Amino acid sequence: MNVYLVSIKRKSWCQDYAMVVIAEDEKYAERKARWSSDDFRKATDVVVQKINLDQEQVVLIANTGA
């Protein structure tokens, strides 16, 4: 299994705009994101990026506050 960062290129406000998904490949990662969130289900512009687990990195910083 691989780890992917799936995000929506937002044109308007949505509650779920990014998630980390464990899946076989990019196609299944996008499918899992769409099944797991109404925002992803409706999105037309979804970006899927494979996360390299051999490299130290920050893949998601989420802030919905203030």
Image (cartoon, rainbow, N blue to C red):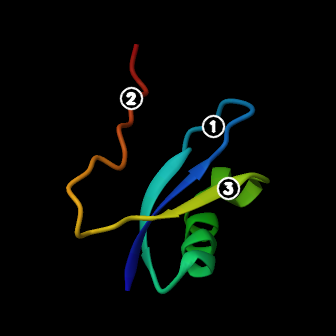
Residue type of the residue flagged with mark 2: Asn
Q: Which of the two marks, 1 or 3, is nearer to us in this view?
A: 3
> Which element carries disc 1, helix, strand or loop?
loop
Q: Which mark is residue 63?
A: 2
Q: Which of the two marks, 3 or 2, is nearer to us in this view?
A: 3
- Which image quarter: residue 61? top left
The x and y percentages for residue 59 are 35, 50
- Mark 1 vs 3, N-terminal side: 1
**Real-space Cα distance between discs 3 and 2?**
19 Å
Q: Are marks 3 and 2 in contact (CB under 8 Å)?
A: no
Residue type of the residue flagged with mark 3: Val
Extreme residue in the right direction: 44
Which residue is painted at 56% across and 51% down in the image?
7
The quarter of the rendered structure image containing the C terminus is top left
- Which image quarter: residue 63? top left
Q: Which mark is residue 59?
A: none
The x and y percentages for residue 21 are 43, 68
**Real-space Cα distance between discs 1 and 3?**
13 Å
Tell me: residue 22, above or below residue 13.
below
Viewer-side residue, 30 vs 42? 30
Residue type of the residue flagged with mark 1: Cys
The residue that label 1 is drawn on is 14
Extreme residue in the front direction: 55
Which residue is painted at 64% across and 65% down in the image?
34
Residue 53 as seen in the image, left or right of residue 37: left
The residue that label 3 is drawn on is 46
> Which element carries disc 3, helix, strand or loop?
strand
Which residue is painted at 74% across and 52% down in the image?
45
The x and y percentages for residue 50 are 46, 67
Q: Which of the two marks, 2 or 1, is nearer to us in this view?
A: 2
How many badges with numbers are in the image? 3
Tell me: residue 52, above or below residue 24.
above
